[in-house]
Image (cartoon, rainbow, N blue to C red):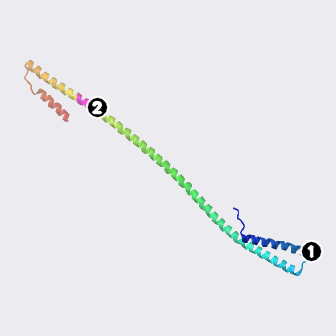
């Protein structure tokens, strides 16, 4: 960033340049030994002004150096803070990645568990359907066996009557009662 010189600084620089040129002329005259008393006084005042300006510049430079040291200290503290924040950011990024992985693993496990549970439910439903079908089949076979037993009992009763055997009219009911008792047990 380039600064444009302020008017006061320009005036000060011009006065300084004029003073230096005068100093050089007076020093050259002093070297030749032709310096007059008023020129000697002027030389003295110009040298004193240069010395005062040099002292002022040193004081200003000292203040600027102190300001630079303060700025360097502040800059160092800021850089330390940046490093700490970056380290914290990196730690948090690792924590987020770890949590992300843990959440993904938990979600995968939950999905797999739900899938296993649904498969088990489906298998149980299929087993229940097969058991129900088997029960229907057994009931049909039992009903068929009961009907067959009753037909056989009636046939026996008819055969006994046809042969002149004593009449057992309660034989079919007895067989039916025994079948019902067997079902109840």
Is label 1 or label 2 in front? 1
Which residue occupies the extreme top position in the image? 163
- Foreground of the two, 145 or 88: 88
| Residue 151 relative to residue 17: left or right | left
- What residue does disc 1 label? 32
Residue 5 position, x and y percent, is 72, 67
Q: Secondary structure at mark 2?
A: helix
Magenta stretch, overall SS: helix
- Circle nearer the N terminus (1, 2): 1
Residue extent of the magenta highlight: 132-140
List x then y, in percent, for residue 163. Answer: 9, 18
Residue 184 lies, with reference to residue 103, above or below; the image says above
Q: Is residue 103 above or below residue 142?
A: below
Across and down, in percent, residue 129 comes to 30, 34
* Residue 130 drawn in magenta: no
Q: Residue at x 33, y 35 (%)?
A: 126
Tag 2 residue: 133
Location of the C terminus (image quadrant): top left
């Amino acid at each position: 960033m380039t600064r444009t010189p302020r008017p006061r600084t320009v005036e000060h620089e011009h006065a300084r340049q004029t003073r230096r040129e005068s100093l050089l002329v007076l020093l050259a005259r002093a070297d030749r030994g032709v310096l007059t008393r008023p020129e000697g006084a002027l030389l003295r005042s110009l040298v004193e002004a240069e010395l005062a300006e040099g002292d002022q510049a040193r004081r200003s430079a000292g203040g600027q150096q102190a300001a630079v040291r303060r700025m360097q200290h502040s800059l160092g503290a800021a850089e330390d803070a940046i490093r700490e924040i970056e380290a914290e950011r990196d730690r948090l990024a690792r924590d987020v990645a770890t949590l992300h992985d843990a959440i993904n693993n938990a979600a995968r496990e939950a999905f797999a568990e739900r899938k296993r549970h649904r498969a088990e439910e489906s298998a149980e439903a299929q087993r229940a359907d097969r058991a129900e079908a088997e029960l229907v089949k057994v009931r049909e076979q039992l009903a068929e066996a009961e009907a067959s037993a009753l037909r056989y009992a009636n046939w026996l009763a008819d055969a006994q009557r046809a042969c002149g055997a004593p009449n057992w009219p309660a034989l079919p009911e007895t067989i039916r009662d025994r079948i019902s008792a067997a079902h109840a047990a």
